[in-house]
Amino acid sequence: VGQRAFWRLFDLSLAGLAIMVAGDTFNRWGVSGPLWALIYAMAVLRILTVWPAFHRVLARNRIWLAYPLVALSSVVWSVDRPLTLVAGVQLTMSVLIAFFIGWRFAPRKLIVIGMVALGAGVLASALNWATLAFGGPLHSAVGGLLGIYTNKNMLGHFGLMAALLAMTVALLPPGQAPRGLRIAALALVPLCVFMVVLSLSMTAVLLLPCFLVLLLLLNRRRLPPGLRFAMLSGIVLLIGAAPLAMGLAGLDPLALLFQATGKDATLTGRTELWRIAAGQIAQAPLTGFGFRAFWESDQFRAAHFAVLRAGSTAPSFHNFIADVMIGSGLAGLVAILALVARSLSLGLCFYLREGSPVAAGSLVTLLLPLSLALVEPYLYRQHELMMGWMVMMGVSIFCHAKPLAGAQG
């Protein structure tokens, strides 16, 4: 009994620490490197203790390993082989750690762990905003709140994920979560919404109502009849009346959206970034230039300068398709799309079979990384929470959802 309790606590610590470190919680203090070394050591030790069972599950789900294997293979043609080798190993380890966490925890437990780990970052950011307890800087150069993060988008994106996870926990039936936990989750939702708005991360601000409404729609049977009717009626009226009212008033909805969010038709330079990416990808469409190598090679210095002029300070084209193809070409794109499709198909089947709050929350939090990755730097790098979450949740559904587990048996 004591041994089981020890390993349960060990696995819980590994999962919580991996989610928090991948979620930019500790980057401000420069301790992410040592923490990743600790996570690697914990994961390798734990996988070795259960290797035969872990290997059997891994062998049946090789599709989740396709992208890191392609990234590792790109060392053969990379313009910076040492960098590609190191980054490819890190990506492989990231996927293996996420695979183990998903294999170890059922979707309901994984949702609670994710809510606590990401909610801690949101709570710390709120405390820092109110008291500056964790030190500055408190705001980014463009005015958005940083909280404890190094980038305002991190607060926005991970605050949005925490809000969805917390809402899912709040909707769980009494038998699946203690009353105190559900009340705490319900209280966390408005705090997350407030922090997302303060972050001024427009992608997160725009997606927040969409995904919260989607989550409530998928859980409509759990809502009181009056609230359910009011929500559905409001959505129908908004969809039907808003375009009509704008048309009668002669308003351009896109112009209003850009004006309200402070953006322009280039999506803050993203369309220019994608044009630059298309020109570079055309030089090596099948193989790319090696995983993560494009951004470090001096031969692409002119392209790097053009990216900076377009407004991107991060080494990214802010679109996962472009970022994958610049590193590993068409082979990498096929591999990452296979990873995404596998996880999403499992999430959709899980929801269609059960229709439970856990299934709805799993599906929504699988859709969020894909939506963000279309305009933000996700789903292509090592040590990245959004890709890790897709692997964790997909593996968790495969290994623990009852109909799927029965089929395996």
Image (spheres, rainbow, N blue to C red):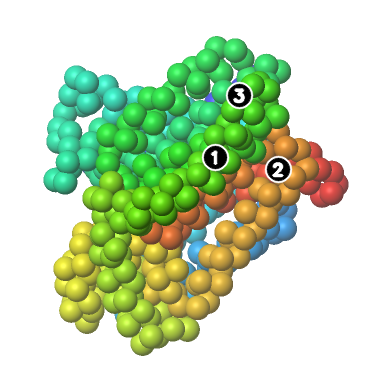
Mark in front: 3 vs 1: 1
Q: In terms of secondary structure, where does tag 3 sit? A: helix
Image quadrant in which the N terminus is located: top right
Give the image quarter of residue 3.
top right
Q: In terms of secondary structure, where does tag 2 sit? A: helix
- Which residue carries the number 2 mark? 351
Q: Is residue 36 above or below residue 12?
A: below
Q: Earlier in the sequence, mark 1 or mark 2?
A: 1
User: Which amino acid, mark 2?
Assistant: Tyr
Left or right: residue 95 compared with residue 383:
right
| Residue at (17, 37) in percent of width and height | 139
User: Which amino acid, mark 3?
Assistant: Leu
Q: Residues within 10 Å of mark 2 (few under 14, many from 20)?
A: many
Residue 90 image offset from top left, x and y in percent: 42, 57
The residues tagged by marks 3 and 2 sit, at their Cα atoms, a distance apart of 22 Å
Circles 1 and 2 in contact, beta carbons < 8 Å: no
Q: Is residue 66 above or below residue 77?
A: above
- Which residue carries the number 1 mark? 237
Q: Earlier in the sequence, mark 3 or mark 1?
A: 3
Q: In terms of secondary structure, where does tag 1 sit? A: helix
